[in-house]
Image (cartoon, helix red, strand yellow):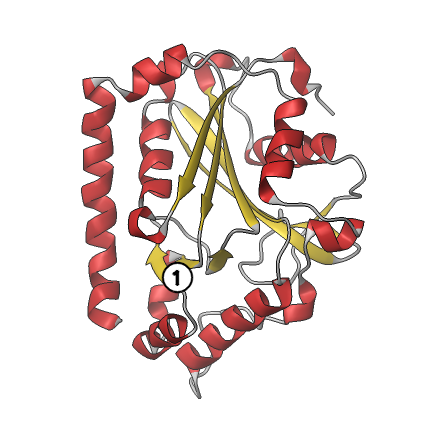
Amino acid sequence: MPNFKNQCFQQFIQPLSPSDNLSSFIYTNALLRSANDLKFPLLHFWTLEDTVILGLKDQRLPHLSTALNLLTHRGFHYFIRNSGGLAVVSDDGILNLSIFYPWHLEDHELTIDEAYQRMVNLIQEAIPNLKIATGEITHSYCPGSFDISVNGKKIGGISQRRNKMGVTVMLYLSICGNQQERGKLIRDFYDTGLQQNQNKWHFPDVWPGAMTTISKVLNIQLNVPDVIQQIQAVVPLTAPDSLNNLMWSPNFISTLNRELISMERLQERLKKEG
């Protein structure tokens, strides 16, 4: 396992509300496009209240509008991200974390598995009492080959995006809160969206009991700021000057605006359906 204390990181902490929920992926995309200008690897922490983040595949639900109405009636906002995958829940008990690794700071381009493993290693080092396993938890929501689980129950999922300049490894981690209710929400979303149609798109058969939280596993009161602090404690952080300079540069602001337009266009179909 690599020692994260051997490499300095920068950080960007972004607490978001539903009114600016698109900013999460707008910044993710813009930072990846600007990876050549990053002076250090970057940790991007973000949180988002009471929102279901949809994947591109979710657009194929035959009764999508009815499923979106269910989310609204349950008190949840929603938007669609510009990447594959399926629906996940974000609320004040969920930590979202992306790690950006620019290729110009690495001795080689990380393989897909190497990039995933770095995220797993970071969480394991930050929370050493967790006995993390990886591998798909079939009946979780948004199942994937690098699901993070403890005792067979999923606590987080990882995805990644890469380009010629670098890779970002993206994690959602269930810290606390009612994971059973999150699971029921996504189960009902897919049941409503499919109704009697054959599930030829392989949407997950979500079992709420297939997932849990770190707080429940460790039997302690833990919240998102606690875990952010534990991650920060195992990673040396540099001054934010170079990151601030990048994010206020005309080129980066232009990239942000392009990504905003792209994300807004992606939401148009949902506006028509919802």
Q: Which residue is drawn at 64% across and 37% down?
A: 226
Q: What residue type is labelled 1?
A: Lys
Q: Position of residue 271 (x, y in %)?
A: 22, 65
| Residue 139 in sight | no
Q: Which of 173 and 41 is in front in this view?
A: 173
Residue sitting at x 46%, y 60%: 87
Q: Name the residue under label 1.
A: 57
Residue 183's spot in the image, x, y percent?
58, 67
Image coordinates for residue 109, horizontal then vertical, percent: 51, 22
Tell me where residue 205 sits by quadrant: bottom right
The foreground one among 131 and 222 is 222
Mark 1 is surrounded, within 10 Å at the Cα level, by few (under 14), some (14 to 19) or many (20 or more) other residues, namely some
Q: Residue at x 35, y 72 (%)?
A: 68
The quadrant in which residue 196 appears is bottom left
Whole-percent x, y for residue 19 in the image:
29, 51
Of 263 and 56, which appears nearest the observer?
263
Quarter containing the C terminus: bottom left
Residue in view at x 79 percent, y 52 percent: 219
